[in-house]
Amino acid sequence: MEHKYSGKVISVRGSVVDVRFSEAIPPLLSVMYSAGEKAVTLEVADHLDMNSVRAIAMTPTGGLSRGETVYCNGETVHTPVGEGLLGRVLNVFGDPVDGRSLPEDMEFRSIHNKPIPLDRRVVSEEIFTTGIKVIDLLMPLEKGGKAGLFGGAGVGKTVLITELINNMVGAHSGISIFCGIGERCREGEELYREMGNAGVLDNTVMVFGQMNEPPGARFRTGHTALTIAEHFRDDQGKDVLLFIDNIFRFIQAGMELSGLLGRLPSRMGYQPTLGSDLAELQERISSSSSGAITSIQAVYVPADDLTDPAATHTFSHLSSSIVLSRKRAGEGFYPAVDPLESRSMMLSPAIVGQRHYDVAREVRRTLAQYEDLKDIIAMLGLEELSREDRSIVFRARRLERFMTQPFSTTKHFTGMEGRLVSLDDTIVGCERILNDDFPDASERDFYMIGSIEEVVK
């Protein structure tokens, strides 16, 4: 079979392979294949000179040797799209990894699409309720927007994202796409099983680039998932829920590749192209008049430092940022959302209504005042505070406990039935706590409950 470009491998350094062509060289982002027995897939990253290219490997390079023939047809990586993918688990190339083959007549598309033009974009002013009290009240999500869950290791990002999937996919009539970038295979397998048990797998596509795969595959997994999401949005006019776990692993894969490609690192060792790499992925997540892509992304924060370049670059793309705090997790408040660090552009009276806005502001003000009083309490004790300050502490401690909630996905650890709480119930509950409606109830009565009616009972 005749190929458009044919070359020879001149060096193999981990995931980076240099190839020399005798005539023309393939364009950037073209996919190349080695002709050997263990075929290796490569993607052109740099043009070194008139005859040589530097490529990143998307499959392991074990067994690839110098002098081996590489061929290319000048095309980029393509993935299948369409309804035949629903209920399936795929890798970066769109190949199934669940042991079953795909239907024959699948349509294939390049994973390197451009974002839709500005004149076709639609900005929604509708909020997306999740059934989780603290999120719906203080940092509501935007329908067709992007929300990030920020937190260090072990504060509950994946637990929160699986609970969001559990709450939203059942109530959401569109398509869900889960993109696992650099995730543990245990989490992927558990999620697949849970979604099957919940009966929502038939409306879901799962795309994984796991920790054991080369950085080239992890770096492109998000692009594959987005191409599938764009097909459902543009061609079928459906609303898509896109879950990404974890955006930091995408940045980390780019950092690994940048070092291997010999680019000078920028601040704190990140790739010099960090901003443009992230923007290329994030700007494709948008809504048009035909459908919306609502994205919820977990973002690992190295050493709990929110000023890390990976976190600050991600913040700038989001309409809602949900920050998880190790301190709150240590105090037993789950979900461990920090209400003072988190924010949402949706929290304005024009969008959520005056009542919701006023309650959210008063809750945040009460919690902020309590935070300021903690040092005085630690040194002098609660008795030294004025009556007014004591009532602020009294309300804040109840609000903190009311913002906790048992999850369906953690039922086998806690033994508590999961609760879904409507936004109206959350607002009523907070209003009643702020009005001191429960003078005889103990703080314990507000911990790990659903609506405020449970305290009354």
Image (cartoon, rainbow, N blue to C red):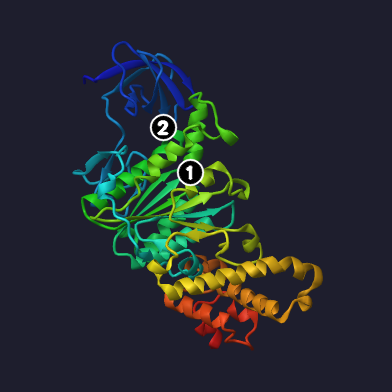
Toward the left, the furthest residue is: 105
Q: Quadrant of residue 53?
A: top left
Placement of 86 over or under 198, stated as above or below? above
Residue highlighted by disc 2: 59
Q: Quadrant of residue 381?
A: bottom right
Instruction: Report whether 240 appears left or right of 454.
Output: left
Task: State whether residue 340 appears in this view.
Answer: yes
The type of residue carrying mark 2 is Thr
**Residue 216, x across and y down, in percent:** 43, 33
**Residue 247, x across and y down, in percent:** 47, 46
Toward the top, the furthest residue is: 22
The type of residue carrying mark 1 is Gly
Q: Residue at x 44, y 30 (%)?
A: 60
Residue highlighted by disc 1: 182
**Residue 191, x across and y down, in percent:** 44, 56
Circle 2: is it few (<14), some (14-19), or many (20+) Cα within 10 Å? some
For the N terminus, the image quarter is: top left
